[in-house]
Image: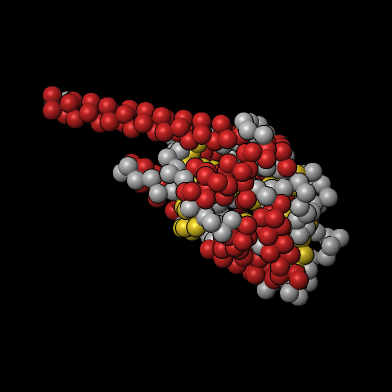
């Protein structure tokens, strides 16, 4: 290495250290501000939160949620808190992650609140781009929808279910366990998302890696499951049209919607029901409007917001006091955002290896 290259590398290292140090200091500022707020008696806390959010007057949300569903929830927020203007960008999970990483590297701090898929959220947590904030709504959330310390709550998730064509498969014949899908009856008649990583994570949690990986490999090699590159909505439509007998990793809300419209589909939950890593809501560590950000997060975790998400959107909302449109009778196994987010590369590599991708 030449001397000039050595100096350049050292300069980059120094800049990186300074950048991370600055983020850490700023994160501490946002965290301390909100921790001091939470230390107040609840009535005083809410008064101070509203007063300071009113002074800030605006908040910017970057979200992986689609535009329509975002607007439905924000309509409720605006009705309750008309003094805070919400600006939002709906970008999808990778879009949110890439935009905020790019902006932070450039010293741009537009986002106050982020909502994104669990695996992507871990990168922002580890890089201190989001700050710890414990909403007073956390005690009302379902098990598995928030980490043990209460800092990273999920706003919604999706439960896995086997969706089948009810003209081609009777309710008696429908699989009752994942192992049932290894029977000759289902060979060449199933479809599976080619990125069903959370399903594999859940099976590893329940069965161990050796059994779960071998099972996935058998689905592909022996049972000739079709690996789909389309959306889950389209996959469900294919099953309704009779192109496949069933979806291994169906989304419950898709089945409920099509069935209510008269399509020949039904569904069965495999106990315990595996739930995808919840999408996380968090305050940005460089938020310029921390009070308005906390107000928006609290609303997303409120009973009212959960009712909007559950009843209008079919999502599995986080609140214990809000029923989903369909509730599995079995226990739930929520795939951990923190645990699997940090092992995501290994998980994807294993999934791809077992499926030959």
Percent x, y of residue 227? 57, 57
Percent x, y of residue 276? 64, 47
Would you say residue 316 is visible in this rendering? no
The answer to whether residue 346 is above or below residue 51 is above
State the quadrant of the N terminus: top left
Q: Horizontally, is 170 left or right of 11 in the view?
A: right
State the residue lying farthest toward the bottom: 262
Taking depth in this image into account, of 46 and 251 the one nearest to the observer is 46
Q: Horizontally, is 201 left or right of 164 in the view?
A: left
Would you say residue 95 is visible in this rendering? yes
Quarter location, residue 315: bottom right
| Residue drawn where x is 48% and y is 35% of the image | 30
Q: How many labels does the image show?
A: 0
Quarter location, residue 225: bottom right
| Residue drawn where x is 23% and y is 26% of the image | 10
Taking depth in this image into account, of 45 and 7 the one nearest to the observer is 45
State the residue lying farthest toward the right: 172
Q: Horizontally, is 99 left or right of 46 in the view?
A: left
The answer to whether residue 166 is above or below residue 221 is below
Percent x, y of residue 28? 46, 30
The answer to whether residue 201 is above or below residue 39 is below
| Residue drawn where x is 72% and y is 62% of the image | 311
Percent x, y of residue 216? 63, 46
Quarter location, residue 232: bottom right
| Residue drawn where x is 50% and y is 58% of the image | 85
By what rule are the colours in the image chosen?
secondary structure
């Amino acid at each position: 290495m030449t001397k000039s290259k050595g100096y350049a590398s050292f300069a980059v290292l120094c800049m990186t250290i300074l950048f991370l140090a600055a983020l850490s200091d700023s994160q501490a500022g946002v965290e301390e501000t909100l921790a001091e707020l939470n230390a107040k008696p609840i009535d005083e806390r809410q008064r101070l939160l509203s007063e300071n959010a009113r002074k800030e007057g605006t908040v910017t949300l970057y979200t992986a949620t689609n535009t329509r569903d975002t607007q439905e929830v924000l309509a409720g927020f605006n009705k309750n808190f008309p003094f805070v203007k919400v600006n939002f960008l709906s970008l999808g999970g990778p879009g949110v992650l890439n935009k905020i990483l790019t902006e932070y590297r450039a010293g741009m701090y537009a986002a106050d609140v982020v909502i994104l898929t669990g695996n992507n959220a871990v990168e922002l947590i580890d890089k201190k781009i989001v700050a710890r904030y414990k909403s007073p709504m956390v005690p009302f959330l379902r098990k598995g929808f928030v980490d043990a310390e209460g800092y990273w709550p999920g706003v919604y998730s999706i439960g896995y279910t086997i969706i089948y064509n009810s003209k081609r498969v009777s309710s008696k014949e429908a699989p009752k366990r994942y192992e049932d899908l290894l029977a000759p009856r289902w060979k060449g008649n199933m479809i599976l998302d080619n990125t069903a990583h959370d399903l594999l994570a859940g099976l590893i949690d329940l069965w161990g890696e050796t059994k779960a990986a071998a099972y996935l490999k058998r689905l592909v090699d022996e049972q000739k499951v079709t690996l789909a590159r389309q959306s889950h909505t389209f996959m469900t439509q294919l099953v309704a049209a009779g192109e496949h007998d069933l979806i291994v990793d169906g989304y419950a809300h898709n089945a409920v919607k099509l069935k209510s419209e008269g399509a020949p589909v039904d569904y069965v939950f495999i106990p315990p029901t595996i739930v995808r890593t919840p999408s996380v809501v968090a305050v940005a560590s460089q938020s310029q409007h921390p009070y308005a950000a906390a107000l928006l997060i609290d609303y997303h975790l409120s009973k009212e917001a959960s009712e909007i998400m559950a009843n209008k959107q079919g999502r599995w909302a986080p609140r214990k006091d809000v029923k989903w449109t369909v509730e599995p009778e079995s226990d739930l196994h929520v795939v951990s955002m923190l645990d699997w987010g940090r092992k995501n590369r290994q998980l994807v590599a294993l999934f791809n290896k077992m499926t030959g991708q």
